[in-house]
Every structure is written in structure tokens, then in C-alpha cells.
Image (cartoon, grey):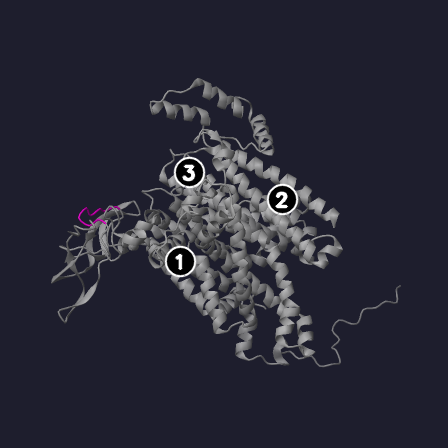
Amino acid sequence: MLQYVAKRVLLMIPTLIAISIIVFTIIQLPPGNYLESYIAELQAQGESVDPQKIAFLREYYGLDKPLPEQYLHWATGMLRGDFGYSFEFNMPVTKVVGDRMFLTIIVSFVTILFTWAVAFPIGIYSATHQYSWGDYGLSLVGFLGIAIPNFMLALVMMYVANVVFGTSIGGLMSPEYIGKPWSWDKVRSVLEHSWIPVVVIGTSGTAGMIRRLRANLLDELQKQYVVTARAKGLPPRKVLRKYPLRMALNFFISDIGSLLPHIISGAEITAVVLSLPTTGPMLLAALKSQDMYLAGSFLMFLAFLIVIGVLISDLALVALDPRIRLQGGVAR
Amino acid sequence: MSTLELPPAAKTTDHFVSTEPFDPGSAVRLTPEQERLYLASQWKLMWWKFKLHRVAVVSGVILLAMYASTLVTEFLAPYNLHTRHTDFIYASPQPLHLFHEGRFVGPFVYDRHKALDMETLRRNYPEERTTPHPLRFFCSGDSYRFWGLIDMSFHVVCPPEDATLFLLGTDRLGRDVLSRILYGARISLTIGLLGITISFALGLVIGGLAGYYGGWVDMTVQRMIEIIRSFPELPLWMALSAVLPVTWSPILIYFGITGILALLDWTGLARAVRSKLLALREEDYTTAARLMGARPSRIIGRHLLPGFMSHLIASATLSIPGMILGETALSFLGIGLRPPITSWGVLLNEAQNINVVALYPWLMLPVVPVIIVILSFNFFGDGLRDAADPYR
């Protein structure tokens, strides 16, 4: 068991290195040296260029050094918690980012809980009532959930919430908490404001999960042990609760690997529409102004979040599933 | 061994041999239906099975109609893509009428004129229900360049000579939303097809190599797929499309975006190809082919791939909607396609804030075709997947 955990954690390292190389490549992709175009832009705006600052930036990124060295500098900087310097905001990325990454984690986490809470009963109902009207109806709703782009859903929900409930939506907390240190009231305010983004982000993920859970459970329901249990006279509800449901629970955790990237993607674009103080709007702004180091940090952070999420789900699976625990490996 | 003798050649056998042609089905006669079933080719069986899935067939027809419409968009759209009507800015959808004062006239519209609401400063376009203006059919209207080649002005439907025809309203420059949606289909629909072609090719080659060679090739490909998959799709798409050079022409951007969408999408297909190949390469017929000296490319292409091509096509169909949604999202955010190229996402870019939802909700209409296409592709792909293995 411990050996497996150690192996799993070690395996993460090359993945993260590879991801960081890809992100660094993307940072370097825009043609020309960022600094040069930055200076040119400043001069075009008629602002004077502070040679000291330019020198500082050049020094900071080692921009006149060869690429591999720049990469090493950037990557090791991240390990020290130094995510680089935002050209756009003129301050270290960590300061620009502030609470945003933390809020992204919260929103993603709550969305996963929401997805589970909705997908679980519906998936079970669909599988046990296959080809009933309820199943067809829920499947159609699920398909619609996949088909409606979530940014549109966000817009419409925002409008509906405004008209029906009379609340102005947007943001993740009441204005008086912005910039304040974390307290229980602030947490409650965040939770109160987060239901719209959570519903919007969760919809398409939930739809996908219901379909996968239904297919999985249908397979499980046809297995011989279920037939045996039924033949022995166990009531259907108990059969369901005792065996296939427990298998399905397993699936819930192992499915995080495909759910999490989806949720994070959805969270980014929904956050732009709802102007949530998460990474989304900032990432878009950074990309639009070609502030690549800031954008790169966000990308790196999101990928890291997914890698960690998958790691946690794998470890939870080991803890939960005796077959994996006893054989010392994940059977895939 | 000189005692060995062959029997005399001309000697007839003692037992009876029928001279009738051999008919293996003589013992158990097949009914004509059974015969049709057993003799049908695999593709024919798939077609029969696919036809059973009603929703999938309907979806297929819808998709076919939509793709066919992109061939003759210029005829179908009542206006040119770029025609501006400065008198009709943010005009609401114009109703189409059939009866004028209880008398049947055929499809017609009433004339409308701008009336500024002095309190809210909103533009209203009330109808003047005095004279009906019948629509013209198969007529000459806005001029355009058919497929960018031939100057023409033929339309299936034109607005009346002295009135307008904005069935779905107009946007902030007074351009007809319906026409723009029709033109947008051209870009939005082809981007999915083009993207899937690229990602299909990538998936086949990379997955094929990994599955056939196994070993370190397989290991490398597997790791690569894992790493690509651990990126959140949309942010990576955003980053890549944001670094497309600003100096590129819109057409180049179009191909660039398609490439980006395809670049991240091939992993699923490659995985499917790999796992199938791993299983199939142990089959006897593969060994036979190898012993006969067939090259790997021939074994993969001629013997292995056809065995599960139908599955691949089905799963490729299921991944087209993701690409269409991806393009829509990128263009919506303003880092995908840019005007003058018009896709549904570019149109939705106009509907970015809540004011639009409240004041000009018809600007969100381009989302309707998006939903229809995504649903159709999902159902169509589902039907294909069920039909892909007709022997089950």
C-alpha cells in the first residue's frame, strides 16, 4: 500500500515536468521577445521607458540567456513559490493572483459535490428504469445539458436571477467582503453567491456523468452475482443497495480524472461571463494582452490542480476498494 | 517398392455420384429473408441496424440538410452577410403574416419605421398595418460573390421592394441576424469536419504505431496522451489561440484554430486504435500476413484497421460536437475567429453581457443552431456506435 502511494507520487514528477515544458513553450510562442514589444508599445504610447525597470525585467527572467537556462530559471522559481513577474500589472504574479487560485479551488470543489449530488440519484434511476419515460426524459435533459454552451446558460441564469429573485449576480461574495481577510461570514457569503456558477459549471459535467454512471450500472446489473442475489429472494432495493451501488460509488471517485478537466474548463469560461474573481477572467485578460508569464502561471496552476485531483482520487480509490488495496495496484 | 501400382485410370467407381451441381443449402432451405441477411455485406447490415435507431436517422437527415445548406448559403440568405441597414439598428424580429384584414395574401410583412422611446431611449420598430408587402421568391436581391468567385444576386427569398425582412432581427450595425446565422453555419460546421479529419489522421497514425509496435513506442505515446489529458482543454485552447500572430489573415486564423482544436483531440481516438490493435495483432491472420512478408504499414492499413474502422468513425462523430463547442467558446471570448469571418461563436460574441439578454434577446439566437447541431451529432454518433457492430 505505502509502496503504491510512493510510486504514484513519484510518477507525478515527470508528468509535472513535461507539463511545465509545454507551458514554457507556450510562453515562448508569441513571435519576438516580449520585452522588446513591451518597450515598443510603451514608446508608442509616448511613455518614457525606465531603463532600470527594463534591466530589472531582463535580469529577472534572464531574457538574454539561452532558452534552456530561462526554462530552468522559471521552473525552479515556481518551486520556490515565485511564479514570475506580470508585465501587465507590474508586480509579481503571486500578488496579482491573490485569492483567485484559492477561489478556483473552492468553486471546483463545490461543483464536484454538486455534480455528485445530482448525478448519483438520477444515474441510478435511469439505470434501474431503463427505457422508461423517466429515463428518456432525463436522458434528453442530460443531452441538452451537454449541448447548451455554458457561457450562454450563465448569461440566461444571470438574467433570470436578476428578474425573478431581484439579486444582482456576479462576483463570488458580497462587496463588503472583497479584500477582507477570510472569516466565517465571508465563507458564508461566498457559498451564497456561488450557486449560480456551480449550477452552470456543473450542468454539462453532470450530464456526462449521468450517462457514464448509467452505462456502468447497467453493465453491473446484468452480472451474475446480481442475478444470484435476486434468485435467492433478496428484495430488489436491497440487492441494489448491497451490491451494484457500492460498485457505482467506486466509479464516482475514479471518474474524477475525466470530470475535473471538464469542470475546470467550464469554470474558466463561466467565470468570464459572471465576472467571478477566479482565474478565468484574469487568464483571458493575460492572454489578450499577451502577458504570457502570467497566463503561463495560470495554465500551470490549472494543470497542477488536475494532476493533484487525479492523484487524490487514485489514493482514495486505493483506500476504498479492497481489490486494489490487497493486490497493491490499480487494475485498469 | 516396385509392387506399388496405380489403379487403372478409366475404371469407373462402384458408387453413385450425382452430376448435379453441389448445393450446400439443400439440407436446410433458407427463407428469402434469411438468405438476404446472411449474404448481406457488413456495411449493408450496419445500414439496416442504423435505420432502426429512429432518432439517429432523423439527426442524420438534419445534419445532412445543414451541411447541404452551406453549399448554397448565398441563395438561402435573404441578405448579404455584410449589408448594413442604418435605419434598422437593433431591430426586433419582424413577424411574418399570411392574412391582411381577414384576406389571404400569402407570406408578407408590414413596413416598419423607427420610433425612439423618449423615456428609455430604446429603439422600437412598430408595424404600420396599412399595406401588406408580399415577399418575393426566386428573385434578385443583394448582390454577392458566389463562393467568392462569381458575382450574382439570385436569392430564394428576397425582402419586398419597399420594406425589410428581418425575421430574426438585426444587430448593432443593422445586419440581418438570420442571414448571418446562415453564413455562420459555413464556418462553424466545417471547422468540426476539418478538425476531425486532422485529429482522425493523427489518432490513426500515432495510435497505430503505439499499438502495433508496443514496447517503448507505446510507453512514450501513452505518457504523451496522459500529459495532454491532464491539461484543462479550454484554457489550453485559449492560450494556443491567443498566441496566433495578430498579423495572420482571418483565413489563416481559421486554419490555425482548426489545427489547435485537432491538436488536443486526437488522444481519445489514438487510445481506441491502440487498444484494438494490441488485441488484433495477436490474431492468426496477422501472423500469417507477417510470415508472408507484408510490411507493417500494409498489415495495419489492410488487415487490422478495416476490422474496427466503423467503431472509429462512430467515436469520431461523437467528438465533433466538442470541437464545434470549442470554436464557439473561443470566438465568444474574442480570441478565436475574428470578423469578417463569421461563425456562430463570432455572432454570440455580440451577446456578451446581460444588457443584451435583457434588451436584444434575439442576438442570442445563434445559440439555437449550435444546440441543434450538438444534439444531432450526439444522437447520430450514438446510432452509428450501436450500428458499428452489426453482428451482435
Q: Secondary structure at mark 2?
A: helix
Are both tags, 3 and 2, on one chain?
no
Q: CA distance from mark 1 to mark 3?
A: 28 Å
Whole-percent x, y for residue A253 in the image: 61, 56
What label sits on residue A171 in the rendered view? none
The residue positioned 51% from the left and 55% from the top of the image is B316
Of circles 3 and 2, which is in front?
3
Give the extent of the magenta segment: B82-89
**What's the amino acid at mark 3?**
Ala
x and y, in percent, of residue A203 in the image: 47, 57
Question: What number is the disc on residue A285?
Answer: 3
Q: Residue at x 16, y 50 (%)?
A: B118
Q: Which residue is mark 1?
A: B371
The residue singled out by tag 2 in the image is: B223
Residue at the image position 66 percent from the left and 47 percent from the top: B213
Main SS type for the magenta part? Answer: loop
Report whether A164 appears left or right of B296.
left
Q: CA distance from mark 3 to mark 2?
A: 32 Å
Q: Of label 2 and label 1, which has the lower sequence position?
A: 2
